[in-house]
Image (cartoon, rainbow, N blue to C red):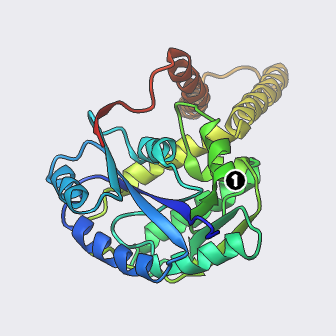
Amino acid sequence: MKEEKKLCSIIVPCYNEEEAIPIYYEEMTKVFSDMPELCFEFEFIDDGSSDDTLERIKELRARDDRVHFVSFSRNFGKEAGIYAGLEHAKGDYVVIMDVDLQDPPYMLRKMYESVVQEGYDCAATRRADRKGEPPIRSFFARMFYRLINRISRADIVDGARDYRFMTRQMVDSILALSEYNRFSKGIFGWVGFRTKWLSYENVERVAGETKWSFWKLFVYSLEGIVAFSTAPLSIASFFGLICCVLALVGAVFIFIRALLFGDPVSGWPSMVCIMTMLGGIQLLCMGIIGMYLSKTYLETKNRPIYISKEEE
């Protein structure tokens, strides 16, 4: 009796990618023909695109019944797109990759072999370099990976991409974490499982422009730190303790100076600077606490991670 082929679901989050979709599809079909041991399906996630992204996906759907899609009612973000794709993926294996071909399709063969032949639960990718990326952006990205690995228990490799090949067991474990504030790179590491990291040189996108500005990446990094570490709260407490100690030492110094030399009215500029510094530290600590409270507030609302307008 001939063994039935296993299904591999390819999750493709898309936001205003009308130019890249046809190119991506043609490249992927070439890869599929070189991997006859698997059956494939596409799960395109249209993240509330304002261009003709959904129309391009529907055109592919009309030609190829392996193509499926979910279209959001508005832009919910890539994290919601990844979660929706994982929910709708039916495969024994699941792959997450970008449509702009910065995640090289040719690596699928090696990723598949790592999982099936070498016994890993996941084959993940990382960029070996940041060629073509602005130096300041690369610097802060490296600092982020160092920081989050030091202050949290999330295992996030420098240069890690969302591009990965996973077993069904790992996917089900990720879906069990249905939190609203999602940071997938941290979740992938938190659930554990044996992961093999594969490196590749940075690749430029085939069409369109990146949707990730420096500010969006900065905010995303803060969300990752808040989601997987309570260290900022400890830092805020440390700042408070230091300020209390300095205030006590300052009070003793002023008292002794007044006993020995009197109390001339002077030093108001330095006093203003000290008050400003303390006020800044207080606002910083309140902001840190506020970030954690806001995340808790959003979780307790129990809102859906995404809303589907159309799917097929």
In this rendering, does residue 94 appear at all? yes
Which image quadrant is residue 165 in? bottom right
Count the marks.
1
Q: Residue at x 17, y 46 (%)?
A: 50
- Give the x, y percent position of residue 4: 58, 64
Mark 1: few, some, or many residues within 10 Å (few <14, many ≥20)? some
Residue located beneath label 1 in the image? 189
Left or right, 117 with reference to 35: right
Q: Tell me which residue sits at (23%, 69%) in the image.
A: 22
Residue 306 percent coordinates (x, y)? 39, 33
Secondary structure category for the residue under label 1: helix
Q: Is residue 33 left or right of residue 113?
A: left
Give x and y (percent) for residue 312: 30, 43
From this view, report whether residue 303 is shown above or below residue 178: above
Q: Which residue is farthest front?
A: 1
Quadrant of the rendered image containing residue 127: bottom right
How far across and down, in percent of the image, does residue 216 sit?
39, 49
Quarter of the image where one finds residue 262? top right
In the displayed structure, would residue 280 be above or below residue 210? above
- Which is nearer the eye, 153 or 139? 153
Quadrant in which the N terminus appears: bottom right
Picture layout, residue 259 above or below residue 97: above
- Foreground residue, 187 or 268? 187
Which residue is pictured at 20% across the width and 57% down the height?
62
Residue 309 or residue 295, whichever sits in front: 309
Is 42 on the left-hand or right-hand side of 62? Answer: right
65 on left or right of 166 = left
> Which is nearer the eye, 175 or 101?
175
- Callout 1 amino acid: Gly
Residue 45 in view, yes or no: no
